[in-house]
Image (cartoon, grey):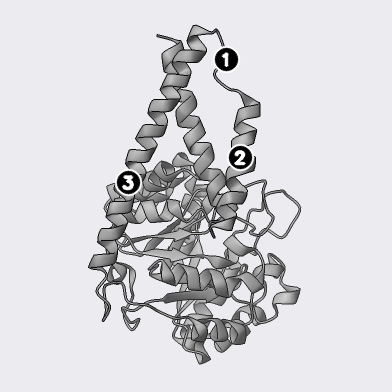
Amino acid sequence: MKLESILLPGIEDKRPMVIAGPCSAETEEQVMNTARQLAADGVKIMRAGIWKPRTKPGGFEGVGSEGLAWLKKARQETGMYISTEVATQKHVYEALKYGVDILWIGARTTANPFAVQEIAEALEGVDIPVLVKNPVNPDLELWIGALERLSNVGLTRLGAIHRGFSSYDKKIYRNLPQWHIPIELKRRMPDLPILCDPSHIGGKRDLIQPLSQQAMDLNYDGLIIETHCDPENAWSDAAQQVTPSRLKEILDSLVIREEGQSTEDLSALRRQIDEVDNQLLELLAKRMRISREIGTFKKEHNMTVVQTDRYDEILNNRIPQAKSLDISPEFMRIILEAIHEESVRQQVVILNK
């Protein structure tokens, strides 16, 4: 399943494939106004939420099937394809009745295997592209499981959408990107098209451009960006939507790099990476041998495995040292936590022998 597998007639097989439109279809005027501006700028696929269950009740939860008629009208007038999110069997039937061209499954639905299976069974025998957003929690197996459920009923035009993962830590992003998870998905399913949703990752419109560029640098196939004719007055997710004109500026600014080697031969540099990785593995193995010796000492002297003062000392010393070497402190913290976790595991094994 390469990018071409989810493309529709008239859409070029080139990066980025772009899907744009409002978070929610609000009124016929809003849908048509946005559609006309997007079409004028060359966007081929329009998105809009029809059913919008929110995290908490009481907010705007979508206009329902009425909005599908507006999308259908937008397609008839502009020639754009239309796409929307489905979360139930009923949503599927309604979307297909109005001729929706592309469906996607939202993050909360992906996290529910019962709901995904219901959608899959409703789509059995239908030849339509279906995109699956990552689950709200950082669970790669759950993401892959949703794709497999759709594949198992015969759907072949599948793609993934990376929209970030929920977290209590919202210092910068609405949803943490955790880029390593979609990278691992691509490694496991190399022919699966992956689109990035910078609107939901960033949560703020000024983050959409840098996130889009990062997605392109990571060889994503496309972007799905929330675009509204009047984002400041949007009925849902106003802060993360951009105008069609701003969308065009973002897309025009993107640098699209080639996946393979160009004039520069990377083989020599990659050999250096391989050599350094081998050295890192040898050093980690040596560190674990020392940890096991410490575990033996602790066992002989009836000491607990975790010595919090020592762990704090390591964090307080190594992280500033890493920063001075132009290494991200957050990255260093993740590395040290992983090393500490493995050291503790190995010492626990020794204490329980």
Residue 285: x, y in percent? 35, 34
Task: Tell which of 179 and 93 is nearer to you.
Answer: 179
**Residue designated by label 2:** 315
C-alpha distance separating marks 3 and 1: 31 Å
Mark found first going from the N terminus, 2 or 3: 3
Quarter of the N terminus within the rendering: bottom left
Q: Residue at x 28, y 54 (%)?
A: 274
Q: Residues within 10 Å of mark 3 (few under 14, many from 20)?
A: few
* Residue 279 placement, left or right of 253: left
Q: Can you say whether 155 is above or below 343 in the image?
A: below
Tell me which numbered mark, 3 or 1, is placed earlier along the sequence. 3
Q: Is residue 64 at least partly visible in the picture?
A: no
Q: Is residue 349 above or below residue 164?
A: above
> In the rendering, at what x and y percent does residue 351 appear?
46, 12
Q: Nearer the viewer, residue 338 or 29?
A: 338
Residue located at (42% from left, 20% from top): 293
